[in-house]
Every structure is written in C-alpha cells, then in structure tokens.
Amino acid sequence: MGSRGNWPTCQRQGNRTWRRILGKLLLAAAALSTAANGGESDDLSSLSLEELGSLQVTSVSKSPELLREAAAAIFVITQEDIRRSGATSLAEALRLAPNLRITQQGSSDYVASARGFGGVPDNQNFSNKLLLLIDGRSVYSPLFSGIFLDSQDVMLSDVSRIEVISGPGATLWGANAMNGVINVITRPAWLTTGASVAATAGNQELGLQGRYGGKLGEDGAYRVYAKAFERDALSLDDGSSAGDSWYRGQAGFRVDLTRPGGTATLQGDVYDGANERAGPGSQAISGANLLGRWQTQTERSDFHVQGYFDHVQRGMEVNGVRLQINTLDLEAQQSVLLGSNHRVVWGAGSRFSRYHIVNTASLQFQPPRRGLELWNVFAQDTLSLGPQMKLTMGLKLEHNSYSGWEPQPDARLAWQASSSLLLWAAASRAIRAPTPFDTDVVEIFGGVRFLEGDPEFRAENVMAYETGFRASVSPTFSLSGSVFYNRYDDLRSIELSDTPTFLPLRWGNLMEGHTYGMTAWASWQVTERWRLSPGVSVLQKRLQFKPGSSGIVGTRQAGNDPQAHALLTSSLNLGRNQSLDFSARYVSQMPDPSLPAYTELSARYAWRLSDSWELSVRGLNLLHHHHREYPSPDGFRINRGVFAEARWRP
Amino acid sequence: MIRANGNRSRELLWSVVALCGLWGPAWSQRIAAEDLHSEDSVKAAFVLRFAGYIEWPEDAVQGETFTIAVLGSGNVATQLQTLGSGRALLNRPVQIRRITSIQDVGDARIVYVGTDRRGDLRKVLAALAGRSVLVISSEDAALAAGSTINLLVADQRVRFEVSLAAARQARLRISSELLSLAVRVQK
C-alpha cells in the first residue's frame, strides 16, 4: 500500500567467504557419510520399555498415505519435515507443501495462495481465498479475507502436522475455504512434556525459543512456550536496505485434561511485534487468543464443542491507521455412525467479529466500526457403496452479514481400486463472502473520492471439479496427483461511475472465468537413509469480464500467478547422528507485472552431539546472491541467508 | 554504519559456529550416547514389549503360537518379523501375520493398526468387539476411536498412551508399571 523509501546502508555480503565455508562443510559431510556405518545392529528387543522410550528416533520415510482414504488433494507436512527444513516461522514451514505457493514480498510480507489468485498489490488485490486454521481457530482477516502471515505463528517444534488441502473445503472446514485450507495441528500437551530450547543466529535472523511442559495432576498435562526473533530488512534494487526489518515475540500455553469419556483443551497465545516500513514508519502488530474445546467419544459417535476469542491489532506509526478486531467463535460438531453404511457429520457454528478502524484522510472504512456475523449449519453423509467405494455428500448453509445465506454443497467419491490405489473425484461449490474491504472502503486522493466499495457486493464463488489418485507403486515409492477445473463467477472487478469524470471507481462483481491445472507429488525412498520428494503444481487461468463491465486494469488484477511451481526435497540421514537436507524450488515466470522464473535452493546440515544437543547450519536461497519473488517495487530483493542453530532438550 | 558493524559481528559469530561444525561430527562420534533408530523399528520393539505387561483372560488363550497381526504399515511388520524371530511370548513362539482385512485376524492376541489404515480403525474395533485382542494403533486421535494402546512420536521419541476403558471392554488387564510409563491414561 505505501511507498517504501531508501535507507542507505553499507550492507555487503562476504559472498566468497560464504561459498568457501559452505563448500568445506559439504565436503566434510560427504566424507563422513561414506565413513559412517549403516544398519541397526543393536538388538532393540532386549531393551526395556523405559529404554525404548528414551531412544531418539528418525523416520526418513514418510507414512506414504497418512490420509489414504481422503477424497481430496491433501498434502501433509509432518513434524519431521518441519524439523529437517529448519524453518523458524510458520510462513517458511508452509513452503514445504507443493500445492501451496508462498511468495515473500518483504521481510515480513509472506503471501500464501493455492490454485492462483495470489494477489496484485498495485491493483489493491490481495490473496483472499484461503482458510488458515490453527488448532481449529480460523485466522483469515474478516476485514478483507486475506491472511496476515506476519501475525500468525506457532511453536513449530510442537506442531504435529500441517494438512494442506487444495481446492474447496468449505462444507467441512468453514468460511473462505474457496481455493484451499491450511490446517495447523499442534500436539496435545501430554506429548510435549519437558524442556526444549533452541537458538538461531545468522546473517539475517536472530531467534530464541523455549518450551516447558509437565503433568498437571493425574490426568492432565500443560505446556508453556515463548519464541522471539528479529529479522533483517530485505534489499532494494541498488543493494541498499529496504528498511523493512521486523521483530516478533510470542508466548502461549496449552492444557489438556483427560476425563472419563473425553478430553478438555484450553490454549492461548499472545504476540507482539513491529514491522519497519521505510515510508510510513513502523507498523505495530499484536494480538491474543484463547480457545477452549471439549471432545467426547462413544462407540458410535464423536462430539466436540469449541469456542475461542481472538484479538488482533495493527497500527501504523506515521499515518495513524489502526485497526482492531475482536472475534468470538462458537461451534459444535458431531460425527455419528448410522447403521453400518453411513457416517454422518453435522454441526453448527457462529462467529461474531467487531472491528474498529482509525481511518486516514486517504483510506477509509465507512462506517469505521461494525459488527459482523457469520452463521452456519452443515451436514455430511459418507455412504459406503460396497467395501471399496465411498460416496460423501454434504451441504453447508452459511449466512454472512452482507450477502445472506450461501449454500456450499460438496460431493466426493472415493474408490479403493486396489490395496495400493485410491481414485477419487469431487465437485463442490465454495464462496468468499463479502468483506468490509469490498463494501465499505473509500479511497480519497486529492480530496476526490477515487474508489468506493459496493454495498451490493456479492460473494465471489467457485464451482470446482477435481479428480485424482493416490498410489503406492512400491513399498518405497508413492505418488499422488490430481487435476482440477474451477469455474469462478462474481469475481471482484473495478467499475466506473455515471459521472463525467467516471469517479469514484467502484468495486463490482463483473469478472468470471475458469482455471484448470494439476498438482502431483511423490515420495521415493531411494535407500533406507535417503528420500527424494518431488512435487509440482501447474495452473492455467482464463478470466474475462462480463457484459457491462468497464474492464479497467484488465483481468491481471485477479492475481499475478506463475503457471508452474515445483519443489524437490532430498532428505538424507548421514551415518549415525547427522542429516543433510536439500530443498530446491522453481517458480515460473510471473506474467504481469512480469518477473523472470527463478530457482532457489536451501540446505540444512544437522548433527546430534548427544542425546540432548543438536547443532545445525542452514543456508537459505543459496543459488544466487539475491533473488526476488515479486516484481519491484512491491517485492524486495531477498539475499542469501546462512544460519546456525543450537537445540537443547535435556 | 552501526548496521554494518552488526552484520560483521554476526558474520563472525556464524563463521565460528560453522567452523566448529567441521569438528562437530568427529566429536559427536565419541559423545553420542545412542544412535538414531528408525521410528518403525522402535515402534515394533514397543509392540513386542507390551505383551509382557498385559494379562489376557484364561478363556482367550488359544493357538500354538503367540500371533501378532499387522494391518497395513509394511515397515512395522518387517521390523516385527526381524525383532520377533526366534522369540517366545507367553511360552509360545512369536508369529507375525500381515493382514489386509480385519476378517483375517484369526487367533491373534495383538493387532497393530498402521498409520496408513487409520481410517479403518473403527471398523477393526467393531469387528473385534467382545474379543480379548489388544489393539495397538499409531495415530493422533486413535485412543478416542477406541484403541487400547496408541504409539505416538513426540520430541523425536516414541511415546504411548493407554485407554483403560478399551482394555476393560476387551477384558485385558494392564500392569500398573505399564500405566506409569504411559504419557496419558484414559480412564
């Protein structure tokens, strides 16, 4: 949104030094790997339960089909994946999913998108068709449906897994799950007892994090954690600092209580940080949330009820724009077996958001305070059509404050063609409900109302048709792929007024079109100690304006999306206590504004000194002195990064 | 200028750490107490160990062998075969049987349900209802679904949780020693 100024600094990279040291490290690693002896000679069967529990374990292999029966394009980022990547923030960890595109525009500006629509900042279009859930808490911003990734983080070492679903998931997962759902699931507290501390230092980041957990009475457990990091600014074209350094601190807790018949969970986080901006100065970000959940099970049914409160605040130092959002969300869901062939899931939920914005002269939300309500009821039935085939049909009715009731139906068919092959197909409708940014926004330039929201703005919607497969080709090779065809309607466009100057411009719903593409990934256990995991996503967009539209700015405004991106991860256990991981990614050319394709590589080498100490070095974006993931001026230059980390767990 | 100095000191810091790294592996060869084991082999060792802490009802004792059926999870089955070969439990030779359907459970006393078959867990439990078979699973929410012992990995170590309610239904008695080592006991 604002311009970014120029902070000249004498940032000079010791480029040759990096390369020399890195080269030496790799050589040493290679030498050691050949010397290391393989195989598990110890007789595990002679160890006691206690001894077994104290062994550190590793799994190069990934459970090939963690979500074998799911009729959707789901990629699972496991705890092992996260740990081996060395990622220090949620945004970076999300790069591990081949069906998600993460674009780093500034030091703290990460944009996530799936199946396109990644936004075009200079057209005021932001990625807004994804749902991000952190332990069941929805964190997309109700103001514009986008995700402020700089506000969202978790203690990555306590994450159980991150499920990334491309395609609509609205029926089950909830509002805004139009092009994808990211579901971050942390471990229950009884699995995170004890202390754990990690410190990171590098040429772009300093970070520290710690967690402590323990038992709470006879049937409960708790953990508390805190993490903080400081990251340097990216660079401008001339190599000088872009002035967008940032820091962030977060602390939180989780308590789990086991009761006869169920479990109760209470968890919460607070965070505080500041993103520097060369133009408008510092932007303060802070927030807090508290979530409670009760889950109960009987032989034939699961039930959970959940409520959370979420407070978000962002403010600019210079122009005084501030926003504050408080959200209260309640939901209940039951899953029940009916007869021998039906599994029915049904539930209801409501969300109340109240926001308050301190407007500036040029960017205003009118009214500046408002309450938003979101209600939903849904039901879904999974019907077994014989032993190998399952049909799932569901419908969610969602009511939002602007466009009223919106039906979101979903039908999925899964066929277990053989013990190693699942075929699936799905058709579903999902929407992005109107937000204050679509309906209430007013932009004023030079005293003239330049752009206005449309109070009649309708929900953007998609009909998605997908089909895919998941196959275990051999015990060491699994493959998953899907193709999709998405029909979009009522996408946001910019329309003219009936005045001589055509001003103010207005948001409209006069863009439509379709996208198609594919996603595929594989996991190949080359040897017992080495796994290769390639993944690729391809996207074609065909959008057009509907009759009566002004067509200004063109369909480019819907997102500056590359046609393809790919990922290749290599995970290698080197001998006994070391590991070497590489991750290469390729992103094809961005169309408009254009940016050449790029390939980048990150690497991490870790060794375990003892049961409690692990040291690692990590290189980020190693192939080039600098690269860019979004064109200038909205995207800055990202420099090569080298980091060392020490991890201690008594 | 201050910034440049900051960078230089950071550069120095990481260079020192990186150089230490060259010696680290050699060092670790001497210091490391334990090698890293594969998750699946440790899970398999746990499965074999558990038998010693469980009491099956008298009327459940059947068969010439102590059979462990493995549904899915080829790796764990392989590791079980390696670790279990030539061993005896309850005075019977251990036999590992890979099954693809719970109908093939036969006289197994333990059924291990692999992560890749988590969707079938409820079906397994329904099929085994009233029988004294120890169901061991390895999935986040398995205890809730009715399994008796659930293996989980946390902080790179294998942990397990126990459901006494499920054990009661299967008429299995679980020793207090086992319960004391569980990260969680569901009553």
Image (cartoon, grey):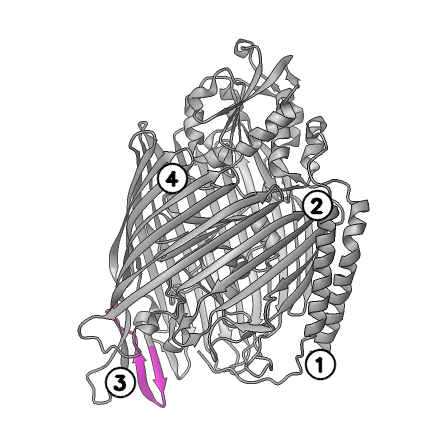
| Chain assignment, label 1 | B
Distance from label 4 to label 1 (Cα)? 59 Å
Q: Which mark is residue A575?
A: 2
Magenta highlight range: A442-458
The answer as to whether the residues below labels 4 and 1 share one chain is no
Viewer-nearest of discs 3 and 2: 2
Name the chain under label 4: A
State which mark lies toward you, 2 or 1: 2
Specify the farthest residue to the left. A547
Residue B75 location in percent, x, y? 56, 34
Task: Tell me the element at label 2.
Answer: loop
Q: Nearer the viewer, residue A379 or A576?
A: A576
Chain under label 3?
Answer: A
Which quadrant is the N terminus of chain A positioned in?
bottom left
The label shown at residue B2 is: 1
Relative to A401, is A636 on the left or the right? right
Q: Which residue is mark 4?
A: A422
Q: Nearer the viewer's eye, disc 4 or disc 1?
A: 4
The mark nearer the N terminus, 3 or 4, is: 4
* Disc 1 to disc 3, C-alpha distance: 48 Å
Cα distance in 3D space between marks 2 and 4 = 36 Å
Q: Is residue A213 magenta?
A: no
Label 1: few (<14), some (14–19) or many (≥20) C-alpha neighbours in 10 Å:
few
Residue at image position (70%, 79%) is: B4
Numbered-mark total: 4
Q: Quadrant of residue B127?
A: top left
Q: Which residue is mark 3?
A: A503
Q: Does the residue at mark 1 contact the one at mark 3 (Cβ under 8 Å)?
A: no
Crowding at label 3, few (<14), some or many (≥20) Cα neighbours within 10 Å?
some
What residue sits 39% from the left and 83% below the top? A362
* SS at circle 1: helix
Front: mark 1 or 3: 1
